[in-house]
Amino acid sequence: MISLKSGLAKLFAKRIYRMVQKWANNPIETQEKVFQGLIADAKNTAFGQDHDFKNIHNHADFVKQVPIRDYEALKDYVERVVAGEENVLWQGIPLYFAKTSGTTSGSKYIPITKESMPSHVEAARNAILLYIHETGKSQFVNGKMIFLQGSPILTEQNGIQLGRLSGIVAHYVPKYLQKNRLPSWETNCIEDWETKVDAIVEETLPEDMTVISGIPSWVQMYFEKLQEKTDKKIGDIFKNFNLFIFGGVNYEPYRAKFENLIGRKVDSIELYPASEGFFAYQDKQGEKGMLLQLNSGIFYEFVKADEFFNESPKRLTLKDVEVGVNYVIIISTNAGLWAYNIGDTVIFTSLKPYRVIVSGRIKHFISAFGEHVIGKEVEQAMKEAVLNTDIMVSEFTVAPKINPEEGLPYHEWFIEFENEPKDLSKLAKRLDESLQRQNTYYFDLIQGKVLKPLQITQVKKDGFHEYMKSVGKLGGQNKIPRLSNDRKIVDKLLYVN
């Protein structure tokens, strides 16, 4: 028997499906309307005046007037907004700053405006509603849903609220979900992650959990604590749990582990949210790729990844992209980000409608657990760790160890030394402490005991030389990547050594 709530969810899902189809079936026109709206709304801002928005009529004009920027290049404008100045990147001042780990200068402050905020909430909601429309499954709305996220406690700076994106979004949970949503507000506000997960376990154990959502590494920790406490599979604890919603990192390395923990397969929905915008979500269970959000105040440009570092790479709009090509995604938004490089690369899996998968980062990185560690951070950590010592490092690279034989996962540093240190554990400790100082995500994962501190594996003398020779990349401009998000390099490195 279908409950009233379940029946209403199906009706709402049908309505949202029709609305989504309207813009998804008219993608080029939709994006053109978004583009013209953004330019018109921002023409009198400081950024709009500096870049002559009044004389931008089309994408070609925009390319001439507005260069591609990353956060560092936009930072001078952002700092004016942080200081409380109005009408800098967008009309007025932002509602929030989403504070994230920075690339080269500590924390980043990503603006969220009253115009951009709704899309962060509606996209996640619509992903669930399209799942209901496609599958006909709606009974889960009667059970409890858990969203593992950051603390909703916000601070204030010059009249602008400041917090992590997931904590900000927690303030916008629709009223019809409030009674079904866990954890409680009090538990959600616990800063210490391990304490928080213990509290979540206690709160959820007696409940009929039907939907569980979060970054896979965090959810895995929650599942393991549940299993440790009950000695049961998650599917036996929560018999009606049939939908897992995730985003932030690639789920595939976790899938086998999850299915073992749950004891059966469950449906899943992949999301592509970021502080800069909610870009895509999975709209079909049987399709590879997520539906690109074209009607959410975001104008997209794409640059072929293998051309990105050319002097003047060609900036493509949606009408020019192809399936199977790796693109750097560039965004302009109603939060005041202009021709902004978020660092992600995507590949289109479909053009009717436009669906993408996230293929990685334009620069090498590790984010197997959502930590977003970049090359500069590991290089800085090494610099600090060997300072005032007699340690000399020939070469190194870093990779995640996702499924160790025992204990928590960790980052594994493969280091070739000129002179072997007397105390490897001391060096590892200094490296780890530096990385935690630089990267708040990594700090949280260590403190929350999702990761254990990094471990060092010594590489024999000339080991990297032999590796590069074995893969045909010895000499020239070829370099060992400082870090990778998988173990392809280090597995080969270990093999040749």
Image (cartoon, rainbow, N blue to C red):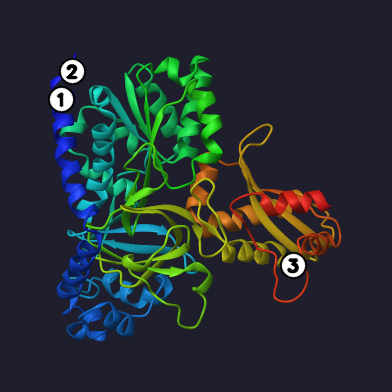
Q: Residue at x 52, y 50 (%)?
A: 443
Could you tell whether 298 is left or right of 350 in the image?
Answer: left
x, y (%) of residue 420? 84, 58
Q: State whether residue 453 appears in this view.
A: no
Above-or-below relation of 496 to 67: above
Residue at the spot of label 2: 2
Could you tell whether 158 is left or right of 204 in the image?
Answer: left
Q: Are marks 3 and 1 in contact (CB under 8 Å)?
A: no
Quadrant of residue 407 within the rendered picture = top right
Q: Residue at x 51, y 27 (%)?
A: 259
Q: Residue at x 49, y 73 (%)?
A: 308
| Quarter of the figure with the N terminus | top left
Q: Label 2's element? A: loop
x, y (%) of residue 386? 72, 64
Above-or-below relation of 364 to 169: below
Q: Label 1's element? A: helix
Above-or-below relation of 231 to 247: above
Q: State whether residue 479 appears in this view.
A: yes
x, y (%) of residue 180? 24, 27
Q: Which mark is residue 473?
A: 3
| Along the viewing direction, whichever of 336 and 34 lies nearer the viewer | 34
Pointer 3: residues within 10 angstroms few (<14), some, or many (20+)?
A: some
